[in-house]
């Protein structure tokens, strides 16, 4: 089971999950694009913490509740859950899964609409949540997908689904990183990499796989400027690989094409020889990557 987010894009191009209009989003999820409506796309829908089963009426009630906190310009939060091709859950199982994920995210008591689609080869459910609670306070989406992912391993075991992540929880961020993220409102890079590429770490059988698949979603691996490890970069920010996934810490099998940074390139000959030894690629085969994350050519 994997997660995905909707909503507007951030400055880095990642989906934030945030939006302004409950009615517009729910209408789109029910009918599709207004110029090419597809009413058959919906398999079923349900609501949580609302006195109606109608998504359209739910949107009006959610807008009314959100009006209790007019300072929040984006009261809509949109994310979803998806299964691998060929896997299926019943409606009751989907509702249970969504409830457990919402509870882990701190949204168990918030108004929400679930809309299941059948317009792709992968069963998936969209979840539209009101960030404003009954007390008028706004839920903050800080580390939202990290918390969502914490509920998934147990769901995969309970429903016999394929495992999409590692057994361990993601590493905790340092206090400085958390404070900086709260100050700037920018998602920590380690969280973003896990959110957008966590399934690649689970599926890759070697460094060649991992490096190519990461490139397909906009990331690359580089040698650390200091020490002997690797970092993941999106072109502007860098984070230690061990902060993304503990099991990949250390320089035992870094990818052959990881390019040394400027400071590494100007190091002493002995250090360059050492770096070259560290940069030997593993001899693992290169299986075809999953269609959703295949590298762009």
Image (spheres, rainbow, N blue to C red):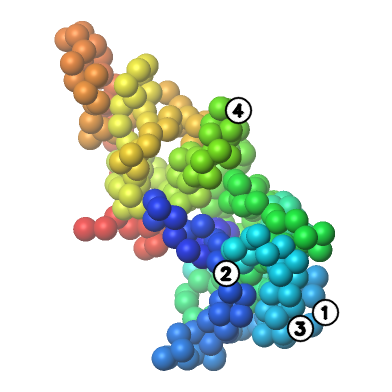
**In the image shown, does 148 or 6 lie closer to the viewer?**
6
Which corner quadrant holds the C terminus?
bottom left
Question: Residue 290's x, y, as percent?
Answer: 39, 59
Give the SS element for disc 3.
Answer: loop
Q: Write down the residue under mark 2.
A: 20
Distance (Cα) linking label 4 and label 3: 43 Å
Distance (Cα) linking label 1 and label 2: 22 Å
Nearer the camera: disc 3 or disc 2: 2
Question: Based on the displayed image, in which of its 4 quarters is residue 48 positioned?
Answer: bottom right
Q: Write down the residue under mark 1.
A: 51
Nearer the camera: disc 4 or disc 3: 4
Q: Which dot marks residue 53?
A: 3
Asked whether the beta carbons under mark 1 and mark 2 sit within 8 Å of each other, the answer is: no
**In the image shown, does 62 or 81 lie closer to the viewer?**
62
Distance (Cα) linking label 1 and label 3: 7 Å
Nearer the camera: disc 1 or disc 3: 1
Classify 4 as above or below 186: below
Q: Furthest-front residue in view?
A: 71
Sooner in the amino-acid sequence: mark 2 or mark 4: 2
Q: Residues within 10 Å of mark 2 (few under 14, many from 20)?
A: some
Q: Residues within 10 Å of mark 3 (few under 14, many from 20)?
A: few
Residue 240 in view: yes
Which corner quadrant holds the N terminus?
bottom right
Sooner in the amino-acid sequence: mark 4 or mark 3: 3
Q: Write down the residue under mark 4.
A: 175
């Amino acid at each position: 089971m994997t997660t995905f987010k909707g909503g507007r894009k951030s400055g880095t191009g990642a989906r934030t999950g945030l939006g302004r209009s409950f009615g517009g989003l729910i209408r789109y999820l029910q009918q599709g694009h207004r110029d090419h409506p597809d009413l058959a796309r919906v398999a079923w829908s349900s609501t949580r913490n609302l006195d109606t089963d109608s998504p359209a009426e739910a949107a009006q009630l959610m807008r009314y509740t959100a009006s209790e906190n007019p300072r929040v310009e984006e009261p809509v939060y949109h994310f979803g859950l998806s299964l691998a091709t060929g896997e299926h859950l019943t409606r009751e199982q989907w509702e249970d899964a969504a409830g457990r994920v919402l509870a882990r995210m701190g949204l168990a008591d918030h108004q929400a609409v679930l809309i299941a689609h059948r317009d792709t080869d992968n069963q998936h459910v969209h979840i539209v949540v009101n960030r404003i609670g009954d007390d008028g306070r706004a839920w903050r989406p800080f580390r939202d997908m990290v918390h969502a992912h914490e509920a998934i391993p147990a769901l995969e075991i309970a429903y016999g689904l394929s495992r999409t992540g590692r057994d361990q929880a993601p590493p905790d961020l340092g206090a400085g990183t958390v404070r900086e993220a709260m100050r700037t409102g920018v998602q920590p890079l380690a969280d973003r990499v896990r959110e957008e590429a966590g399934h690649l770490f689970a599926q890759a059988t070697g460094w060649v796989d991992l490096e190519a698949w990461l490139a397909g979603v906009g990331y690359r691996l580089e040698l650390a400027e200091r020490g002997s490890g690797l970092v993941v970069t999106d072109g502007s920010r860098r984070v230690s690989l061990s902060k993304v996934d503990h099991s990949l810490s250390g320089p035992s099998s870094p990818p052959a094409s990881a390019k040394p940074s400027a400071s590494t390139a100007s190091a002493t000959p002995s250090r360059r020889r050492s770096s070259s030894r560290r940069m030997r690629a593993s001899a693992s085969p290169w299986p075809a990557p999953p269609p959703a994350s295949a590298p762009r050519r």
